[in-house]
Each structure stands twice: as structure tokens, then as C-alpha cells.
Amino acid sequence: MSELLVQERNVVVPGEALAQGMDFLPGDNTYREKDQIYSKVLGLVSVSGRVIKITPLSGPYLPKTEDKIIARVIDITISGWRFETATAYSAMLNVRDATTRFVKKEEDLSQILSIGDYAVVKIVNVTSQNLIDLTMKEPGLRRISGGRIISINSQKVPRVIGRQGSMITLIKDKTGCDITVGQNGLIWIKGTSEGELKAEKAIKLIEAKAHLEGLTEKMERFLGESA
């Protein structure tokens, strides 16, 4: 007989039994031994139909193709720019992937992106040696100008975004800020100085309380009180 041994949003530890029987399937960060499913990590339980997965509460960001991240230029080469990605690995943006306009051979690339600039970029390739290729040739990808950039644990990004973008939409609406969330845990906030500060406090509060239930209601109260 199959039985779910945990509940949605329970905090579990590595090796903790999640379900018994073959009616349930192991998802992200879980594994099966005989007829039981166990957690691989410290994290939050999520059950979708028959699939059980765990969202880690800590750990480094692992670059993945199609991820949108916020990264900082640390070097300019003949062919493009090298970025710091908030991971152990840097990434490359080739000139041909940086802009839709033609770039002359002798052009000063620092006029497009200079060292220290931040940009919203997308990962287009990650090799087995963790060489990362980026692009900026899609809507919403660009050099960052103004506002503030904050950093959170990348494992808390899903909670900041919320289901179908509900949490980040709430923060945008209540603060009047434009907010871009990078999967690597860097977040760009742009608005009035008051709005930016309120948004930063809200995001940091979500990071601290990501493991709690009823977080949306807590954020509505917090943003209402600080309005």
C-alpha cells in the first residue's frame, strides 16, 4: 500500500523518507530505494500529482541552459566579454551575441559593455567542463543602468518569483519598481529610492522566511504596513 509520509512544504533533511510504495515517483533531489522515496537534500517538499520533488534551502547556483541571470563584466577580449556569474565559473559573451547591430573589427568594445558593468543575459550553452556561453540578443536582455542590485541565495529564487510569478508581481505592484530576478540569485531593482528600499526589504524577508507557509499573506501584510 502506497503512502505519502510528508506534506506539501514540509522541511526535510537528507535521507528522510518521503513516500512508501510504487504509486509515487521520485522527482528533483529525491531518490528511490526499494519501495521508498528519500530526500537527497535539506529542502521543501513539493508534490505534483504522483511526483515528489524537493526544493533545496541552500547550496550554490548551478548554471543551466536557458537560465536568465545577472552577471558582471570582468574582462574584455578580442572576441567579446568575460562575465562573473556568482558561481565558481565565468562566462563568455561573444560580440555577435551582444547586439543586433554590426560591430566593426576595430571598434572599442568598452563602449558597448565596460568592465564593472552588469547585464541581464541568458545562458545558451554549458559544456561538460562548465564553459558558459551567453547571449543578449533577446527581448529583456540588456546592460543594466541605474537602480540597485542585491544578492540572495539562488535556491530561494523560486520563492521570490512565486507560483506563476505571483510573488514578484505583488512586490512590483506594491513598490512601483521594475524588478528582474536572475536565476543565479542576483536581482535588479529599479524605481524610486523609497520603492527600491521597500522592494529590497521584501525580497530579503522572503529569503529569510522561504521555508514558512502562508508567505504570500505575510508579504501582503508587510508591504501594506510599509506602504
Image (tube, rainbow, N blue to C red):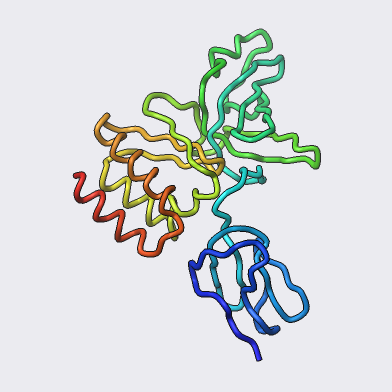
Q: Is residue 15 above or below residue 102?
A: below
Rendered location of residue 38, percent (x, y): 67, 70
Identify which residue is drawn at 64% across, 13% down.
104
- Residue furthest to the right in view is 128
Identify which residue is drawn at 36% across, 59% down.
215
Q: Quadrant of the C terminus?
A: top left
Q: Quadrant of the N terminus?
A: bottom right
Quarter occupied by residue 71: top right
Rendered location of residue 110, percent (x, y): 57, 13
Rendered location of residue 136, percent (x, y): 57, 32
Quarter occupied by residue 109: top right
Identify which residue is drawn at 67% across, 29% down.
90
Rendered location of residue 178, percent (x, y): 35, 38
Left or right, 175 with respect to 8, comes to left
Left or right, 14 with respect to 208, comes to right
Identify which residue is drawn at 50% across, 30% down.
142
Left or right, 150 with respect to 84, comes to left
Q: Nearer the viewer, residue 101 or 83?
A: 83
